[in-house]
Each structure stands twice: as structure tokens, then as C-alpha cells.
Image (cartoon, coloured by chain):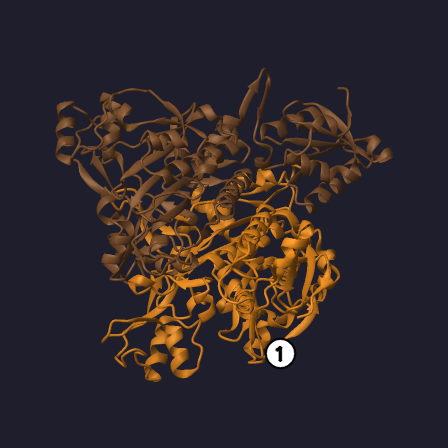
Chain colours: A brown, B orange
Amino acid sequence: MELARRRGFIWPSFEVYGGVGGFYDFGPLGSILKNKIIQKWRELYLIGENFFEIDSPSVMPEEVLKASGHVDHFVDAMVECRKCGNSFKAVDIAREATGKDIEGMKETEMDEFLSKNKVRCPDCGGDLGKVFLFNSMFRTTIGPGSQRVGYLRPETAQGIFIDFKRLQRHARGKLPFGVIQIGKGYRNEISPRQGIIRLREFTMAEAEVFFDPNDPHHPNFSRLAGEKIRLWRAEEQIKGNEHIVEVTAEEAVEKKYIHNELIAYYAVLTKKFLLDLGIPYEAIRFREQKPWQRAHYSSETWDAEVHTERFGWVEVAGIANRTDYDLSRHAKFSGEDMTMTLGDGERKVLCHVVEPSYGIDRPLYCVLEHAYTAEGDRKYLKLKKWLAPVEVGVFPLLRRDGLPEKAIEVQNLLRKRGIIAEYDEAGSIGRRYARADEIGVPYCVTVDHQTLNDGTVTIRERDTTKQVRVALENLSELLTSLIGDLVDFEKIGEPVKK
Amino acid sequence: MELARRRGFIWPSFEVYGGVGGFYDFGPLGSILKNKIIQKWRELYLIGENFFEIDSPSVMPEEVLKASGHVDHFVDAMVECRKCGNSFKAVDIAREATGKDIEGMKETEMDEFLSKNKVRCPDCGGDLGKVFLFNSMFRTTIGPGSQRVGYLRPETAQGIFIDFKRLQRHARGKLPFGVIQIGKGYRNEISPRQGIIRLREFTMAEAEVFFDPNDPHHPNFSRLAGEKIRLWRAEEQIKGNEHIVEVTAEEAVEKKYIHNELIAYYAVLTKKFLLDLGIPYEAIRFREQKPWQRAHYSSETWDAEVHTERFGWVEVAGIANRTDYDLSRHAKFSGEDMTMTLGDGERKVLCHVVEPSYGIDRPLYCVLEHAYTAEGDRKYLKLKKWLAPVEVGVFPLLRRDGLPEKAIEVQNLLRKRGIIAEYDEAGSIGRRYARADEIGVPYCVTVDHQTLNDGTVTIRERDTTKQVRVALENLSELLTSLIGDLVDFEKIGEPVKK
């Protein structure tokens, strides 16, 4: 995290004003990394799965969120200290004080639990008030006066559901079809204390897959049926058992570990996405939510979790069976017909929905933590090459003899070809390599005196620290191939002895 | 607009709940178009100009917006009808009723003007109340209770200014340097009535260029100095004169039409961006804001305007000299040092800022309107090819004989190469071409019986409706070159007689 701040990946927001919990900025490197993760996700669903994308507002009028159940159910049980006035989630302070999980209890049961266990304010030791429910949506008003209440959306999904009538026309009577939305989601957390893991404003990437409840299958299931996933079932969790089963998607469905083929399909897709980001297979598991942990709309939810050193297992995505909950609620509250007429033209259906919903900020943190590598004195970010926010470093060996000018020329050439190349001339060449390693630059190009004579440069590979010498005229093509993992580094040029 | 709705470019938001003014959704085609515009803009500044990008929250605590002046100055003068209770911008109803512009007047002067001209409620004819100021930021509270007031940001710029201390380290002591941010901005409009032109939530793309007030020059000015721009000076506007001058950027600075070289530089860049989007040169002008129209932070502002049939001249970007207003205010309010030490290490400077700030939604609308082409019975969207949300249509000539299967194979092949290809088999081939024309698909590939025999397909060009026959094995490469305007359509294959 120190590295992430210092080098411009992530910064606490509003720092010069003392900061506000639950908000983070993405700096120059973090922004590029974030955009690359978003772009990868978008390709996966938009191109790979042929989904549609929409983009709808983050401010929503109360009617929508009343219908979706969020006004009533998107709540946290909280307590306020009677002495210092600070607020806490009841579940959090109970866990901190007693190690016990009181999730799922009613407010009165929580009250009883807290007083029986003599739980006091963790900040000042003061007396705690009664447990009460706090709606965790940010509230605002639309237009002048306070006539029209609005909220910042807690999820992007509702924008998709209320557009269903228009969207289904694009599907031309065929199910399943999917719609994605990428954008900000908001949760007015009570007192967020886990940095980038518990944000009040976060970027979400959600997919809503509409399917026929009479035919709950994925047409391409066979393509991924043999892929393995690691499952931690609710049954085991309730027994207090850490046991993880490793099964193929097909087995998961056959053995009724996962009750819906589409959930199994998107679990595999999620695993593949996380692998693409560089998260190791062993650090990925799917945890089934216990019935009382599930959101109000869900009949089955599996969280994709990634193991981190700092925060333990972190939820990075959730795959939920939302049934027909949302469409039927919006049909009821809006009075509109939310059914779809299938291709045969004879059968109307109220679609059910499976939702693979991803955070973007948390996977980004996990990527950074997993990429961080210390080998003896050498510290570097072993980012997947395509993910690196700086793809190529360009260095003049010395700050004279026309080498800087030539190096800047090389940098401009690479940038014109769409390669993110950064120029650096400060300090010794070794220090520059080290600085580049620290932010995960996969290749560094050095311009030296030989460059001026024969038009060749050296390329140094981050992971092996090996160097080869290649002709400038092939440079951009070679680097593009190297970043895309299409060629073998040691075969592209003359090895350089160190 | 009818076409834009029907085909999934833009939809009024929350339609099934009766809609809420000032909010729009981007449908499947609109989202792709929007993302392409954003991507182009990002490339222009991030790659082309070597700027940094950051991404900061849309919810901001009050302190920041107090310091930035928005709590005090981001206000609209409004009136409420005493009878029906509807609210209006004073400037709008004065203009509607009298044709006169009362912008810049004080509230009491407005009151006098409205009563002297007997302006009444445009909705019900009722009596109007007194003019009062309404802050047009969306207000919310952060955390439980209402202790901490927050607002939805009116601009992304403030997120950049408050990060200045961290950002300037990335610039390594060199000025000018630039930082961009792309994201949502919010303005709680009183009663927005101009569709997508007057939004309460919009996407902005802003660049803040920090420069040394003692050296207010752009190092690459000479590169764009000879480019022409069309200017409508404030002086002419005040005289009631429509006169536009066409000058090069260099002349604009020399003649002191534009008082800052950086503003002239970014005006040219803005012109190039709009040309890239397909806006014709004659439909682009830069209008200087009159002193009383300028935002509270600006000493000089030029709006880039695009002419549209529906809304007349529409502001799509503003280039403002924000001076040291923001940095000095944040220095004062936060108590932090906001100066920068220049490369020589001896000189500290409080940077000044030139800000090229773009809307994304409005240019998108302008692009659609300008692309819409009616030639006799034929109607099509003459979008720039790279901008088309569907790049290639793939059609089987008939729905039998294995042609659909082959066409789907072709579609998948193209999608794998990153081409946005859509399959369509519904209706006659002529109707399918017409449907593709309507959404601006630049090329349509048809699979026919000859395809099965000799592995060739036809490609039809939207703008000329001409067709050529080419081999499948070259198809994706050819289409990529065609979309990138790298080859001449008529030379790539055998012409097909219609």
C-alpha cells in the first residue's frame, strides 16, 4: 500500500482536507490499470458473450428503489455511542469484542447480545445506545425544493431492469440474453475502516442474464463444463467446516452443489477473468452465501473470493440467482408489462435473472498484492504484461551525446503505435531499472552509443532481467508481440552479457 | 431523435415510471458510440499530449466545494409559481416571454424586469414569486446522521486540484503538465426541457493544464499555430454583431483575440477532435464568453459550439483560463502548500491553469444529427466508420442451405479479430441493408451460395451502396483496413453488378 500510494496507483481521497473514510482516488498508474481491467471485462462480456451494454444514471428517483426493495432492505443495523457519538455497525463491534457473528439476528436480539456481553464503545469505552436500522443509500433531492427524493444507486442492475421493455426488443425473442453496465455504485457505509476494500463509492461491472425459467440452461455450457472451480458450500460453513470441494462446472451442477447451470457457467467465466488478471488459481474460491446472508432478491448466491495477505479472503464478485424478483416488482410498481414474447410468438414469459456482479476496485487491489514480488533485495510488480500501466520504459544510457534526444524519439515512435512508453533519464541506469520494476514495467529499452552507430537498442525483460539487442526498425512490432505474449524473449535478438 | 430511441442509441431514463427530466440512458448502440468517443478523447490527451489521468470520487465533502467557490457561486436565479408551484430559471422565462436576455442581472433587477414585463407562469398563467438563488449541486450526507454534508461534484476538475501535491511529483519539476479526468458531473437543473442538451447527470472529460504564469507558452504551439479556427468574440456579441473571424491560432494570439497561447492551442485540438467525430468545419465555432457569463473562477473562456438543426448552436466544450484561483483557494482553505518547485530547484511557483473541458453527451448528439442523411427515399447515418457502433453486418442471403450457419461462422471470425460484427437474417436482403444503413453500419458482408462454392463473400459499402466480392480468407484484414480508412473500397475486390 505504501508503494501504491507513493507511485500513484491509489490515494486516499480529499487528503489535503484530512480525508474521508471510504473514498479512494486512482492516480496516474491506478487509472490506467483500472481502465485496462474494465476493458478486459467489457471484452469478455460484450465481445465474448455477445451481451449488450447500457449506461444509465447513478441518481435514481425513489420510486425505482422502492420497487427494487432497496428503500426497505438495503439497511445496516447500527449503534451509536452515547458518550462520543460515534457510529458503528452492530455486527462489526460484536465481532471485535466477542469474536462471534451476530449477522442475521433481529435488532432486539442484537441489543440483548451486546448488553449481555457488556460490549462498549471501541473508541471511548462509553455506553452504547439501542441498535437501529440505517439505510445505506446516499439520499438526495432532484430539482429545487425537496419534493422529489432520489438516491445514488446501490447497484447498476436496476438501470437494466427498468429498461427491460426496450432491451428485450434487441434480443429478438431469444433467451437467454445478457446486458451489462459498468459504472459507479454507492453505499453510505457507517464507518468504513478497510481502505479500498470497503468503499462508499466504487466501480461495478454487472451483467444481468435473462433466462427462461422453463429452460434454465446456458447454450454454451458444454464449452466450459469441464473447467474446475473450488467451492465452499454453505452447508460446510454452517457446520463450521473449512472444507473446499474442487469440481468441474458440470459436476457442480450434477451434484447439486450449484442449483443453476447459468451460475456454474458464470463462475467459470469469473475464474477465467481472475486468472487473466494474474490471480493464481489457488487464491480463488467460490463461497456460497448462507441463506440469511443473501440479499433480499436472491435465491442462491456464490461469491468469488480472492485470498490476500492483508485482508484474508476478499469478495470480488457475486453471482446471484435473482429469480423474477426484480422484473415482477417493477411490473407491479410501474404497472407496465415486463414479460417477453419468445421467438415462436406464442409463449410469453416473465424472465428470471442470473447476475454475475463484479467490483473493479477490489480485484485491482488483489492484482497489486499478488503481483508484488520480493526476491532478495529485488522488489518488483510481476503484473501480467498486458496489464502494466507503463508498458515500456525508454532510457538514454547517459544524459549527453544526443542519447536523450534519440530516446525521446524512440518513446514517441512507440506511443504512436499505441504502446504506453515512458521516458526516464534520472539517475543511474540501474536505479531506473529498479524504479521501472517497482511499478511493473515489463520491458525497458535503452538507447546507448551503439544505437547512434548501428540503429540497435537493448530490451531488458522485467521478470528475468535478461537483455537482448534488437534493431530499432523492428522495435515497436517486437514489443507489441512481447506484451501480447506472442514471441519468446530470448529468441528475438542478440543476448547481451551483463 | 425518434430513430435514436427506436434503435437503441438514447432513451429517456426511468421511462416506465413516467420519466424524470434531465436524465438519459444510453442503449446498446449509444453505449458503444459513447465509449468510442471517450476512448478517442482519452487517446488524444493521454497518448497524444502525454497527460496523466486520475479517477476521483463523484461525492465530495462540503469543505472542498466551499473552497472551490461552488457552494457560494454555483447557483441559478429561479422563480416559483405561486399558483401551481412549478419552478423556472428566471433567465429562461424572461427570454421566452420577452426575447430578452437578463443574464448577469441581480435578483432584484430580475424581479423588476419580470414584473415590468408582466411575465407570468408559462405552465398555468399564475402569479410568480420573488427571484431567489438555488444552488444547483445535488446535496447529500456522508455517513449516518446528517453531520457531514456532501455534494455530487459539479465538475471533475476539483478532484484534480486537490490532488495537486501528489500530481506535481509525477511532472518532475516541469511545466506545463496536464491531468485529465473522465467521469460523471452533476447539475441539479431547475426544470430541464432540452432533452439530452440539458442534463442533470452528464459525462465530462476535463483536462487541467498547469502552467507557469511567468512563461505562459505551449512548447508545441508551433505544431498547431497554422491551423484555422472560427472565433466569435465577446466584443462582437456585445455589439449585437454575428461577425465571425477566421484566423490561425497564431493570428488569434498575435491579434490578442485570444489572450493566452494555451487556450489557442487547445481550441485547435478541440477543433481537430470534433472533425475526427465527423462534425463539419463550418458547424464549429468558438464563442468567447462575455465577462458576466464566465464562471467565478475564470478570467477568459471560449466555448466550442457546434451548430445543430434542432437546438441551434450548442456548447460542447469550454476552454477557460482558471488562473491560480483553484490552487490558491485550496491552499488557503486546507492550509497546505500548493506551490510547485521547478526543475532548477530554486524557483517556486503557484501554477495557473488552462482548462479544456468537454461534455461527452452533447457531442454524441451532434454526431448523430450531423450523420443523419436523407437522399431521396434512402435514409442513413453517415457516421465516421471508426465511430460506428456496429462496424460490420453479416447476412446470409437466404435462411436455408447452410447459409445462416456459414454467416454466423463469419461473424464469430470477425468478432475474434475485434471487429464489432452483428448477424441479421430477418427479412429481405434489401430490408437488412436498409436497417444497417439506419444505424450507420459502414460495411455489410453477405454470405450466398457462391460462398459455399468458392469461399468468397460480397462486401457492400454504406456510403456508395457499391459491392465487391472478396475471398473469405482476407475478410477480417480487409475490413479492418476499410474501417481504418487505409484502403480504397473499389480496389479491394471484384465489383458486383446489382
Location of residue A402 (image quadrant): top right
Furthest toward the right, the residue is A453
Q: Quadrant of the C terminus of chain B?
A: bottom right
User: Which one is in front, B192 or A236?
Assistant: A236
Whole-percent x, y for residue B403 in the image: 56, 56
Q: Is residue A185 in sight in this rendering?
A: yes
Q: Which residue type does callout 1 highlight?
A: His
Counting every numbered tag in the picture gives 1
Q: Is A483 left, or right, of A239 in this rendering?
A: right
Whole-percent x, y for residue B388 in the image: 57, 60
User: Which one is in front, B16 or A6?
Assistant: B16
Q: Is residue A61 above or below residue A251?
A: below
Q: Mark 1 points at which residue?
A: B243
Taking the spot 24% from the left edge, 62% from the top edge, the residue there is: A335
Whole-percent x, y for residue B68 in the image: 44, 52
Location of residue A296 (image quadrant): top left
